[in-house]
Amino acid sequence: MPAATDPSASRLRPVDYVSGPWPRGTVQRQPGTSEADTYAAEQVVRLVRELIARRKRRGLRRSQLAAMTGLRPNTVSDLENGQTWPDLRTVALIAWALEADLEFVGREGQRVRDG
């Protein structure tokens, strides 16, 4: 298995991995990236799709979500628009505000939950 590079260290953003409209398009491997980079992009796209859907179901604007979490509005906007690689703290704050659990899916498709 080839080594992963740090996708946040490259100039590629999550949106750069998506063919078609963000975030509904298809994630595709980009030249010079590893399989692990593409997997990371897939997970970010999946996460962003879910966070956007939850925010909209709750009838929240991005600015309201930012206020609930203490994040800057542009941080929420950049995440939802695929312009940045989210850090775990940002994801956890947003999940908390949206009353969502962070759930991890194992590489083999097994659901693994903490607690």
Image (cartoon, rainbow, N blue to C red):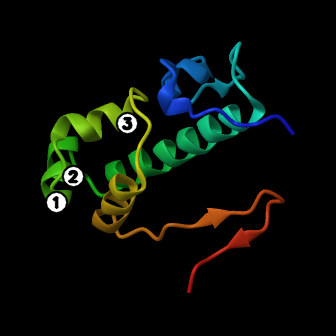
Image position, residue 71 (x, y; %) = 19, 49
> Could you say whether the residue bearing mark 1 is in a helix, strand or loop?
helix
Residue 68, picture quadrant: bottom left
Q: Cβ–Cβ below 8 Å for labels 2 and 3?
A: no
* Residue displayed at 49% across by 50% down: 50
* Residue displayed at 22% across by 42% down: 62
Q: Amino acid at mark 3?
A: Glu
> Which residue is under mark 2?
65
Q: Residues within 10 Å of mark 2 (few under 14, many from 20)?
A: some
> Which residue is under mark 1?
68
Q: Cβ–Cβ below 8 Å for labels 2 and 1?
A: yes
* Residue displayed at 59% across by 17% down: 20
> Which residue is under mark 3?
80
| Residue 51 in the figure: left or right of residue 63 | right
Would residue 58 be seen by someone viewing this image from the given angle? yes
Q: Amino acid at mark 2?
A: Leu
Earlier residue among tags 1 and 3 = 1
Give the spatial CA distance, label 2 vs label 1.
Answer: 5 Å
Would residue 23 be seen by someone viewing this image from the given angle? no
Per the rendering, the mark at residue 30 is: none
Give the spatial CA distance, label 2 vs label 3.
Answer: 12 Å
- Residue farthest along the bottom direction in this orientation: 115
Q: Is the residue 33 above or below the residue 108 in the image?
A: above
The quarter of the image holding the N terminus is: top right
* Residue displayed at 82% across by 34% down: 2
Residue 84, picture quadrant: top left
Give the spatial CA distance, label 1 vs label 3.
Answer: 16 Å
Earlier residue among tags 2 and 3 = 2
> Could you say whether the residue bearing mark 2 is in a helix, strand or loop?
helix
